[in-house]
Image (cartoon, helix red, strand yellow):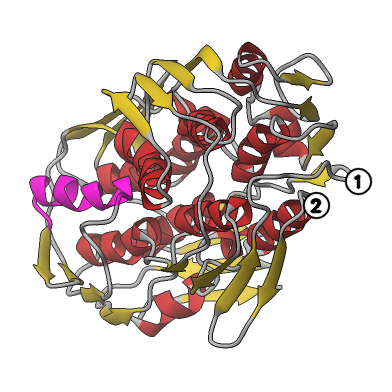
Amino acid sequence: MDLAVQKSPRMHGTVRIPPNKSHSFRALIMAGLAEGVSRIVGPAVSNDWMRGIEALEMLGARVDPKANHVWEVTGTGGKLKTPDDIVDCGNSGIILRFFMGLAACCEGYTVLSGDESIRNIRVCQPLIDAINGLGAWAVSTKGDGHAPGGGRGPLKGGRAELDGMDSQPVSALLIAAALADAPTDLVVRNPGAQPWIGVPLAWLHRCGVEYRHADYSHYRIRGNSHWKGFDVHVPLDWSAALYPIVAAVLSADSEVRACGMDFQDSQGDKLVVDILRDMGADIEIEGDTVIARSSKLKGREIDCNDFIDQFMLLAVVGSHAEGETVLTNAEICRHKECDRITEICHALKAMGASVTERPDGLAIRGGRLRGARFNSRADHRVVMTLAVAGLLADGTTVISDVECVKKTFPSFVSEMQSIGCDMEKTN
């Protein structure tokens, strides 16, 4: 399925924002490790969610959909069984990293694999090394630090070090360490994406797991932890909200609202609102509603590490800002569904922008964009980012293979259409 996008000034209306995927997965995993029954209300349901349920049930939990967007999880009480088949992670780095951590808490061997991105781009060697350092066993079967990978427990605890440029291996170990036989001291070099570490820490705190941490570089987790089931309503996704917000800011004669947003939530992407305001964006906050209006922006240097998923969207912002915008500290973007630094650099150049690629980011000068044709690289953020760019460009922008957008924002096209965006799916 292709997506054809035309320039679209005069966007107006309210966008319904989907629930946050990261909170949904952490709720699912913590519920699967809990004693008794948990109720997860309004999670982000996608192919990744369904694969996560399959993986969790392979470890011994039970997950049942109920009415009114409620999912009921009967937990394992931390006593995980060994899967009787390979865990298929699909295109999900969360499933790969988090379930590799949980595999270190099983007595038998667990094997995990996935699609081409999982097998060749998503690095898991730092996690493998740390698991081995904590008394369990883990391996990359090809010896290249990628899936397929495997592991077995028990996770004994102790002391381990790992590189923290990617937050997911750190988050995976924090949760797995809660089940270890003894306390764990985790030393993180180069700690990155720190707000995303705040998400599992908030969940550990919610479930009563005892831990301490210092500057996101040293953690001590008590281990041998147990917690009861819980009820939770998944918060809305700041990452998804920023696509219509940015589209409104960069388009002429536009005003768009995103309701139900929680500024107290641990999601780091909410910080982009302050970045946009600093660049000159007319963004107003009324309670839990964000109101974004057409604005003229000035370029600036932006350290992207606290909101790494917004790197490509901020590159589009830079292409419409006066002067130069420099995006830094984003090297981890090269290890997502695709190399997002190179992909957005090539895309914006194809649309006529002046862009220079750097090892950890981009330098962009504002200019007039023109439509072009792209492949999504099976990356949901490529689709949404280039769709926003297409709304600002002369002519038609066409993006192929856009079904991957369901990963985080299944209603992206219809919601953007509802505020006046000229985009349409075609065969």
Please tell me which residue is depicted at 75% across the width and 32% down the height of the picture: 119
Whole-percent x, y for residue 243 in the image = 36, 61
Q: Which residue is mark 1?
A: 84
Q: Nearer the viewer, residue 395 or 181?
A: 181
**As drawn, is 351 to the left or to the right of 255?**
right
Q: Is residue 375 left or right of residue 293?
A: right
| Residue at mark 2 | 58
Q: Quadrant of residue 288?
A: bottom left
Report the residue that reaches farthest toward the right.
Answer: 84
Quarter of the image with the C terminus in it: bottom right
Q: Amino acid at mark 1?
A: Asp
Q: SS of the residue at dot 1? A: loop
Q: Residue at x 38, y 55 (%)?
A: 239
Q: Which type of secondary structure does the marked residue at label 2 adopt?
A: helix
Q: Residue 100 is drawn in which quadrant?
A: top right
Q: CA distance from mark 1 to mark 2?
A: 7 Å
Q: Position of residue 368 (x, y in %)?
A: 29, 50
Q: Quadrant of residue 315?
A: top left
**Picture coordinates of residue 422, whole percent (x, y):** 43, 76
Q: In the drawing, does residue 264 fall left or right of residue 23?
A: left
Mark identifier at residue 203: none
Q: What main secondary structure does the magenta stretch of the protein show?
A: helix
In the depicted structure, whether residue 1 falls above or below residue 66: above
Q: Which residues are magenta?
A: 266-281
Q: Which residue is drawn at the image coordinates 28% and 74% (left, top)?
A: 260
> Which quarter shows the N terminus?
bottom right
Q: Residues within 10 Å of mark 1 (few under 14, many from 20)?
A: few
Residue 272, magenta (yes or no)? yes
